[in-house]
Image (spheres, grey):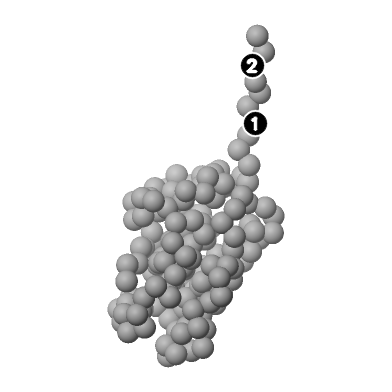
Amino acid sequence: MKLFSPYPRLWVSQDTRRFDLLELRDTLRRHGIRKVYNVTTRSPDERLASGKLQNVEFIHSPLYDVALDEKGLEAAGRIAEQIIIDLKDDLPVLINCYNAYNRSFFVAGLVMRNLGLSGEDVVQNILEVRPVALKNQAFKHFLLTGKTHAPLHPIASS
């Protein structure tokens, strides 16, 4: 099971259903992860949601991989706030979505921005550990600028 870490004690992975339960358990233990935030819109991994992995708290908070709107940004922000509390309590956490391209790294990026990293450093940290991440340009733009929409450039008149 491959995990990506763009920040200390902050891990990102693909959907946990893709992995054997023993591999998942061993990977979480190896990294000290006791809290998993699942941001997929699919039904959660029942192995985690049902408590089959002892000492692992599972939170399912679905986010959509679309353009940012106020509702989606608020939902991602609430997840990021809770993760910040976990990190300040020295609790390693895992965020996962289906492919570990956009939603999970967007939340991880919000965490890093709120912990004081610049937008450029956030995006660089993410792309260093997962070069195929942040294909959703709205997510990437927000992490870089803190704005939900790119400015419109007027068309030059001739």
Residue 11 appears in view: yes
- Nearer to us in this view, 61 or 109: 61
- What residue lies at 47% left-to-right and 83% top-to-bottom? 48
- Which corner quadrant of the image does residue 79 belong to? bottom right
Q: Looking at the image, which residue is at 69% across and 55% down? A: 70
Across and down, in percent, residue 57 comes to 49, 83
Find residue 95 and report its horizontal and vertical position in percent. Answer: 46, 68
Tell me the residue at 51%/71% (across/down): 38
Q: Are marks 1 and 2 in contact (CB under 8 Å)?
A: no
- Name the spot of residue 27 as percent of width and height, x first: 32, 77
Look at the numbered disc 2 and give the secondary structure of its residue: loop
Mark seen at residue 152: 1
Rendered view: 125 above or below 19:
above
Q: Considering only vertical position in the picture, is 33 above or below 54? A: above
Residue type, label 1: Leu
> Quick one: which residue is furthest to the right in this view?
70
Kindly identify the residue that appears in the image at 51 percent across and 88 percent down.
50
State the residue position of label 2: 156
**In screen coordinates, is 27 left or right of 107?**
left
Q: Is 83 placed above or below 24 here? A: above
Q: Nearer the viewer, residue 7 or 158?
A: 158
Query: How far, Cα to Cα, is label 1 from label 2?
Result: 12 Å
The quarter of the picture where residue 53 lies is bottom left
Residue 103 image position (x, y, % from top left) = 52, 59
Q: As drawn, which residue projects farthest toward the top? A: 158
